[in-house]
Each structure stands twice: as structure tokens, then as C-alpha cells.
Amino acid sequence: MNETIQLFKVNMSKELDSVIDTLNSGFITQGKKVIEFEDKLKEWFNYPYILTLNSATSGLTLAFRLLNADKEKDYVLSTPLTCFATNASILANNLKIIWCDTDPNTCNIDLDDVKRRITEKTTILTFVHWGGNIVDLDKVEELKKYAKEKYGTNLNVIEDCAHAFGSEYKNQKIGTFGNNICVFSLQAIKHLTTGDGGLIFLPNKELYERAKLLRWFGIDREKRSLPGKDFRLENDIVEYGYKYHMNDINASIGLSNLPNIDSILKKCRFNGEYYNNHLAKVDGIELFDYKHNPSYWIYTIKILYGKKDEFIEFMNNKKIVVSQVHSRNDTHTCLLEFKTTDLLNLNLLEKQIISIPVGWWLTKDNLEYIICCIKEFSQIHLIVKISKLKIDEIDEYLNLLFEMNNFRGTEINLSSNTIDSIYILKVNERIVCSAKLLIENKAYQPVAHIEDVITENMHRKRGYGKKIIKELINIAFNEFNCYKIICNSKTNLSKFYESCGFFVTGNSYSIYNK
């Protein structure tokens, strides 16, 4: 690979005549182009309450202002795993943060943890849709009802949709349903860019009209009500606002780029699904759950067994740019007053997560090359070993055993004979699979029984179960001279055991020594 494969790239239309026209028009602040751009967005989203801004950060800051939060009484539930802008906007409104853990299956906020942290003081919930993978919004609505029923409070929601332009939830574009305030980014490397900019979606006309005023100092630009003939003097300002508006230059760039957004989303989704299909069984990495119709602004994977730094170096040497993209916010000095130690999922995730290129600029050859490099890394850095269970490994083995429902909640006593029958498969010194090999001594020739084949949930469908069974078959036939091996299973795993060489009869699986 001669050219470096970038993680991010600016998508800019080649049709920029309208931008030049705006630059030469003599009017470049908020004007007709902003109105036209907003109208086009309202049409694309099929939603009436959309305002353009100069950044998503401005939008988030404005969103908290619109909720009239009380800095003395109200607390915000937020995620540390996001762009700093998400939480900077909370600080800008002098509000206090309660951190929530991260969902290990999506990198989004852990809604179960949110529920645990809801009190009468937590009146706002904010989160990012990581990579464009949508937070479970039905569950968010359930949390609103829970807060109302238990504490009598309204849990207001601000969705940071910076990663999620074009993402869909139940076939509806994100930002267009519910009573939440939603903020999008139009920054340089987003799916749709205006050079820099943002959007705020309001849930009703009242908030829409108020936000329209507050984005430009609180001035009603449609009214010049002072007496006299001076056309420029503003009317009375009832509530002070900010200079958060978009200008006609950025709007003209947006108008030039908007016609390309459907093809960009289509390409990113193709690339994301291609990874989902071709990386699912690669040892040493774990994929996240993608539901509904994500935008795939970034594609994040887990690098297991403490090999994240090695992966970054390996991919850089292969001329593939990778990054975690956003560091956890709760470790920044300006947020240390809210620091907590009980974000157990995030504590592990930050040692694992890394994003690989997924954007519209990737060719099919790029995708194949990236996948090939990840598989090569897996082969180099993963050490798979099968051995008998040792005394000092019993606790780790029991944790694996309790993943099976029929063992959960039971007390297990392991005798020395039982321990001697247990074999484990370790990947980079971690137990991920186990099985028992019991030898029954017959008068003529021993028979072996393979029992309790367990694979850790996150490592299923990677072939480890077959690998340990194949090894036990070899041990039974060659070391113990068994003439037959029997497996019993309460579930129908006939296809699996057939692939291991067994003859299937009902729930019993047998293989004979040839």
C-alpha cells in the first residue's frame, strides 16, 4: 500500500459556484442562503423545527440553556466517552455532572446504569450516538416514565447526534421524533459539512422560536421596531442570547454538499456492513452490536488481550490510520470534581477500543487490505494453548462455568480427580473455553466421555469449541487408547458435532477410533 488510508477525510462538492457567488454578493452573514439551507434540511429530514448554527458545541450549549436548568438543584446524567464538546456545554451552563457507565456492546451510554443513577436531582440526560449507532430510544422513553413515577421529575433529554447524521431508528431519521432536543455537527470531517457548523432540532414551535432568538443575541431579526428611520437598530431584547448563528458562506457550502449526502451514507453503510460480515470471526477482536440503520461515521472495534498499543503501531506501519477518536472526559483536569471510580465497563473498554477507516473514500481494495491486515495482526499476536486445568486457575475456570445457566447460582466443589479431567483453551493466557474428558474403563477397551463444553459468550463462533474437542479426541484415542468417545447434550447441536467428526443419534454423539 503506497498511499496512507486515512481515518477521516473532508467531502467537498466540486460544484461550488454558488459559494463563489455568495462570496461576491456583498452579503455573507446570516441571510437568504441560511434560510434556503434550513428549508432544504427540513425537506430532507421531513421535520419543521430545524435551525442552523455555527457549531454543534453552540447547539449543545444552547440546548441546556433552553431547558432552564437550575445550577443549584439540577444534575446532568452524561457519558464520559464522547467528544469533549458534549460535556463542555454542561460546564458552560454551570451544571453538575453525574457520570454514567458505557454499554460494552455499543460504546453508547449504559441505560441500565442511567436508571441506577436517576434521583430527584437528575433532571437532564445527555448522550452521544457513538459512531452513528443509535441509543435505544424506546428505553430512554421508559427512563423518562420511571423518573416521573418514582420522583415526580421530568427527565429532559439532549441527544448529541454529532456522529449520527442520517442514522435511522425504526426507519425514521434520528432527530425527528420524541420530545428530545437533538444537536448535529456539520464540522469539516462529518458526513455533511459546511466547513464548520451545527444544527439544533427542537421538539416544538415554542422552543424553536426561542432558540431562533437566542442564537443571535436574543434579537428578533424579522422585526425592527424602534421608532425613527434607522433600519439597523435592533428591537427590544427580552432575553439575552449568543452569537451562534450560521452565515451564508457556510450555508452555501452546505447547499453544495447536501445533494451528495445520500450516496455518502450509502457507501459508509456498505463499508460498515462489509466489516460486520468479514471481521466477525477474527480472533483477538470483538465487534459491537449495530442495530437499526447507523450512519457508520466511525467504525469501532475491541482489541482484546491488552494488545491495543501493538495494534495501533501495526496498523500505522501498514499505512492505515486508526484512533480511539475520543478520550474519556472524566479524566480531564477541568472535570475532576465529578470524577468517579465505578465506571467498570468504561475502565475496560478504554483499554480495548479503536476505530478503523470506514468512510466514503474507501475502495473495495482498501476494505480488503484493512481486513487482511487485521487478520495478519491476529495471527501474529494471538497465542492459543490447550492444557489441563491447574489449581491456581480454578477461580477463572469457575467464572467461565457460571456462564452456563444450569451452573449459575450453584455451589461447585472440585475434587482432585475432577480437576484432572478438565481441559482449558487459553488465548493469550486467558481461559475462553473448557471441556471435561472422562475415561470409563471397560473390560475390553476404555470409552471416553466429553462433557461440559463451554465457550465464553464473547468468543463463540470463533471455532474454539471445535478446537478443544478435536484436541480431546486426539488425547482419548492416542493417549488413553479409547475405542469410542461419547458426547451427551440437552440441546440440538448435531451440525456442530457432525463437523467435529461425530456420528449423531438423537442427543447422543459418538465417534469411533479407526
Image (cartoon, rainbow, N blue to C red):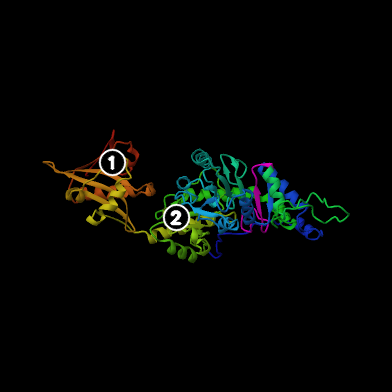
Q: Nearer the viewer, residue 11 or 419?
A: 419
> 4 or 27: nearer the eye?
27
385 drawn magenta: no
Which comes before the other along the chain, label 2 or label 1?
Answer: 2
Question: Quadrant of the rendered structure where residue 186 is?
Answer: bottom right
Residue at x 62% of width, y 49% of height: 68
Q: Identify the secondary structure beneath mark 2.
A: helix
Secondary structure at numbered mark 1: loop
Q: Is residue 29 left or right of residue 262?
A: right
Q: Mainly helix, strand or loop, the magenta region?
A: loop
Where residue 355 sits: x, y (%)? 50, 57
| Residue sticking out furthest to the front | 72
User: Looking at the picture, how far across and down is residue 374, in whole percent?
Assistant: 45, 58
Residue 97 tag number: none
Q: Amino acid at mark 1?
A: Phe
Q: Residues within 10 Å of mark 2 (few under 14, many from 20)?
A: many
Q: Is residue 358 left or right of residue 431?
A: right
Quadrant of residue 283 in the image? Answer: bottom left
**Is 306 situated left or right of 505 in this image?**
right
Q: Give the CA distance from mark 2 to mark 1.
A: 42 Å
Label 1 sits on residue: 502
Q: For mark 1, does the 10 Å Cα neighbourhood hold few (<14), some (14 to 19), or many (20 or more) residues? A: some
203 in the magenta segment: yes
Region rendered in magenta: 184-205
**Res. 328 in view:** no
Q: Is residue 260 visible?
A: yes
- Which disc is residue 346 wearing? 2
Q: Is residue 212 found left or right of 178 in the rendered image? A: right
